């Protein structure tokens, strides 16, 4: 895959130079971080002996949209286990249906068991299912953001610039785990700040640390736990009223970014993280630095937002 574009968007009132990396422009199924991860999962699928896919996610899941799209392109059946608690129709769920995914809606407590049952049912009938964890969690997903980090380093070398801060929306933390692993492997100094869109500390941060450990163990890197902990910054101050809940400052950021720069941001992830980043810059007196924001996608959710589907 080609690198996604990085460019300067504006200078803020503290003379910080704000750049953006457009992972929303990854040219598969409306892009985003789930597309970057899915490309790695499908490389694994294509090189193995599989004939169907099982994954998990809600009706608003960007991950499930992209997985079902890439499965349909290969004529592979795709089974999505989906929690009933989050099953209101969205553009993503409409797309999943368009791609012919079989969506199995169950109570959230039954999700784990349903996945296990579906996998054994498929195996017992002679099928060869490939399982992808929700959100593209796992080493291949982490690897996708080590690759993203490498693209950032390449851009810096080529353009003689250094980003002092990297911000992005952190959910399951796989994106953050990959970026931090990239930094640890390159041994460079900068602040990588994941803005939580829902999860709280210490649990949210621990999931990221676990993913980092799992990845580094797998690639045989010997990095101390203190070093890993120092580099894992998960900010839970800007989650508002919780997952997918928007507020006035998120709405303002979305409006401004679309109007001024033509960059769509959704209210669940990217708009919320962008607004959180601005508050973090303000609260920590960050000034005259180079700041990179990674746009992690979610474009169909931007259209849900336009239709008023996000709760205040
Ligand atoms: C899933 C998602 C995130 C969060 O990524 P994680 O790797 O789960 O932390 C951020 N932005 C968008 C648009 C997403 O779909």
Image (cartoon, rainbow, N blue to C red):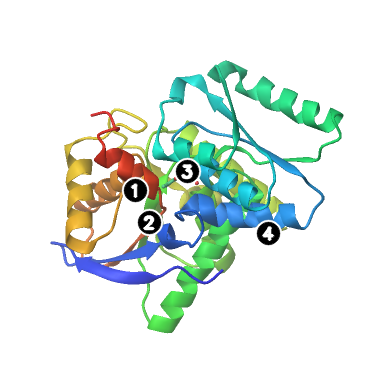
Q: Residues within 10 Å of mark 2 (few under 14, many from 20)?
A: many
Q: Are marks 1 and 2 in contact (CB under 8 Å)?
A: yes
Task: Please give the residue where the numbered disc 3 appears in the rendered image.
Answer: 62
The image quadrant of residue 90 is top left
Tag count in the figure? 4
Closer to the observer: label 4 or label 1?
1
What x and y, as percent, mark residue 10? 21, 67
The residue drawn where x is 65% and y is 50% is 139
Mark 2 and mark 4 lie on one chain; the one further toward the N terminus is 4
Q: Nearer the viewer, residue 212 or 53?
A: 53
Ligand 1 quadrant?
Answer: top left
Q: Residues within 10 Å of mark 3 (few under 14, many from 20)?
A: many
Q: Nearer the viewer, residue 90 or 200?
A: 90
Q: CA distance from mark 3 to mark 2?
A: 14 Å
Q: Earlier in the sequence, mark 4 or mark 1?
A: 4
3 or 2: mark nearer the eye: 3
Give the quadrant of the N terminus: bottom right
Q: Is mark 1 within 8 Å of ligand 1?
A: yes
Mark drawn on residue 221: 4
Up/down of 169 relative to 156, above or below: above
Q: Residue at x 27, y 45 (%)?
A: 276
- Give the labeled residue for mark 1: 270
Q: Earlier in the sequence, mark 1 or mark 2?
A: 1
Q: Secondary structure at mark 3?
A: helix
| Cα distance between the residues tagged 4 and 3 | 31 Å
Residue that carries the numbered disc 2 in the rendered image: 295
| Residue 140: percent from left, percent from top | 64, 52
On the picture, is 196 further left or further right than 149? left
């Amino acid at each position: 895959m080609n690198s996604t574009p990085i460019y300067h968007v504006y200078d803020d009132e503290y003379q910080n130079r704000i750049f953006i990396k457009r992972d929303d422009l990854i040219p598969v199924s409306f892009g985003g971080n789930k597309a970057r991860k899915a490309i790695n999962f499908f490389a694994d699928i294509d090189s193995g002996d599989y004939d169907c896919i099982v994954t998990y996610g809600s009706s608003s899941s960007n991950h499930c949209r992209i997985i079902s799209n890439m499965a349909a392109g290969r004529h592979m059946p795709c089974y999505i286990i989906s929690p009933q608690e989050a099953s209101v129709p969205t553009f993503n769920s409409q797309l999943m249906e368009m791609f012919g995914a079989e969506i199995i809606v169950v109570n959230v407590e039954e999700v784990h068991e349903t996945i296990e049952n579906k996998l054994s049912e498929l195996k017992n009938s002679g099928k060869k299912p490939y399982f992808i964890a929700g959100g593209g969690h796992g080493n291949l997903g982490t690897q996708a953001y080590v690759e993203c980090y490498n693209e950032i380093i390449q851009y810096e070398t080529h353009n003689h610039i250094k980003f002092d801060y990297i911000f992005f929306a952190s959910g399951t933390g796989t994106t953050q785990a990959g970026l931090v692993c990239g930094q640890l492997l390159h041994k460079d100094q900068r602040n990588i700040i994941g803005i939580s869109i829902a999860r709280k500390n210490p649990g949210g941060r621990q999931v990221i640390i676990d993913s980092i450990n799992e990845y580094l163990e797998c690639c045989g890197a010997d990095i101390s736990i203190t070093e890993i902990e120092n580099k894992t910054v998960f900010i839970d101050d800007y989650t508002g009223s919780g997952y997918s809940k928007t507020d006035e400052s998120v709405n303002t950021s979305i409006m401004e970014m679309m109007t001024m720069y033509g960059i769509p941001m959704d209210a669940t992830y990217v708009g919320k993280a962008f607004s959180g980043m601005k508050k973090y810059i303000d609260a920590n007196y960050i000034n005259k630095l180079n700041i990179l924001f990674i746009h992690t996608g979610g474009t169909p959710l931007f259209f849900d937002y336009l239709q008023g589907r996000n709760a205040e």
